[in-house]
Structure formats: C-alpha cells, structure tokens
Image (cartoon, helix red, strand yellow):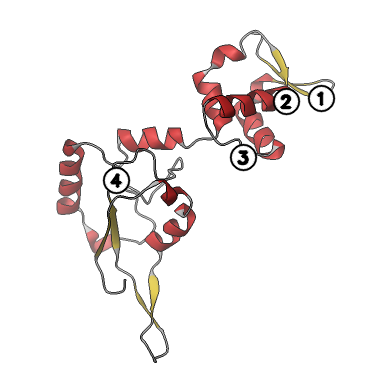
Amino acid sequence: MTNKLFIYGDEINANAKKVSDKLKQVITRPTQNLKKKGINSIEIDDYSNYIFTTNNENCFKIEEGDRRLLMVNEPKNMSDLHNYFLQYDNSKYEIGVDRVIMTAYKKQLAYENTPAYTEMFYKEPGLFAGQCISSTHLLDMAKDYAKKNYLSSNFTMTMFGTHTKALFTDYVKRSNGIKHDFRD
C-alpha cells in the first residue's frame, strides 16, 4: 500500500465499524513503514487517500465532530466532492488537521451512531415528560429501548451517568440518590 495516492475499497460491509479506530489511525498517519523482502523496513511519508463505496447503510462508525470521513450518497454530492478537490489549496494541507465537507448524509450517520440512550432521549421525549426518574430506572429504560430497537446496549452505568449528567444538568435532583426531574 506504499506509494499510493488513492486506495479504493469496494463494497465495504458492516465489519468496517469494528475496525473504525484502526482506520482513523491509517487515514491520518503522516508516515508508514515500507517492508521489502529480505531488507529492513524503512519509514516513508504517507500521501494515501482512501475512497470506499458500499450499498450498505451505516457501515462506518461516524462520531460527532469527525474530521476524517466525507460521506456522500447522492450524485449531486459527488459533483460537490469533485469541485472540492478541484478548488482545494493543498499548499497548506496538514494531515489529520483539515476538516472535510459536512454533508447532510454524514450528519445522519453520526446521529445513527450515537448511544442508544441519546437516541432515546431525542426520539422518545414523551417517555420522560411529567416524571421524576431515578438514574437506575433511566438506565433500565435505555437498555430496554436499545433492545427493542436492535441497538447496542454496551454502555456502563458510569458512561451513562456522565453523559446524562451533561445532557440534563438542569433536571438533576439529589435526594435519596440521583433523580432526573422532568415534571416541568
């Protein structure tokens, strides 16, 4: 894969989510090792760019604020990508620093990759309205929501507590444990 400007991955599948952290490192690395048979490896500059195509929805793990991946799903966006490359001033390019175009499709995919409990809060706010709910019960509700919607429930109480505290600072009550007061 050394000395390549464009590397094309055809028909990427859902397994791409499993290697997404490794892929982030590969996309932004400034150098790579060149290994030739019978010779010690040497470090060379990495100028590779990657293009992946797929018919599978949501096969990449897109995190909010991602700066590495450009996601397009419509022919119009492909022309935007082409124009972006034509007009891009690469004399100031910094590997792993410059941000790519944010498309509506990428925003949608980032939303789809949020934890199940975040999706639950945004898609089902009626579940909480008018109630005062303990953190433990809220966690159970999130795990049930994940199960019913075939989402991952692989989050700990600590992770859940940290995120809900940040989301609902104004609604937290501390009496006999932490409760979230959505009565108003």
Residue under the image location 55 percent in, 29 percent down: 118
Q: Quadrant of the C terminus?
A: top right
Q: Does 44 sit above or below residue 134? A: below
- Amino acid residing under circle 3: Asn
Query: Foreground residue, 132 or 4?
Result: 4
> Which comes before the other along the chain, label 4 or label 1?
4
Q: Is residue 54 left or right of residue 130?
A: left
The secondary structure type at the circle numbered 2 is: helix
Which residue does the numbered mark 2 point to in the structure image?
135
| Position of residue 22 measured from the top left corner of the image (x, y, whole percent) | 47, 59
- Amino acid residing under circle 4: Thr
The secondary structure type at the circle numbered 3 is: loop
Separation of marks 3 and 1 at Cα, in angstroms: 23 Å
- Amino acid residing under circle 1: Gly
Which residue does the numbered mark 4 point to in the structure image?
54
Circle on res. 177? 1
Mark 1 neighbour density, 10 Å: few (under 14) some (14–19) many (20 or more)? few
Q: Does 81 sit above or below residue 34? A: above
> Which comes before the other along the chain, label 3 or label 2?
2
Give the mark toward the camera: 3 or 2: 3
Separation of marks 2 and 4 at Cα, in angstroms: 40 Å
Mark 4 neighbour density, 10 Å: few (under 14) some (14–19) many (20 or more)? some
Separation of marks 3 and 2 at Cα, in angstroms: 17 Å
> Which comes before the other along the chain, label 1 or label 2?
2
| Position of residue 164 measured from the top left corner of the image (x, y, whole percent) | 64, 29
Mark 3 neighbour density, 10 Å: few (under 14) some (14–19) many (20 or more)? few
Q: Does 60 sit above or below residue 152? A: below
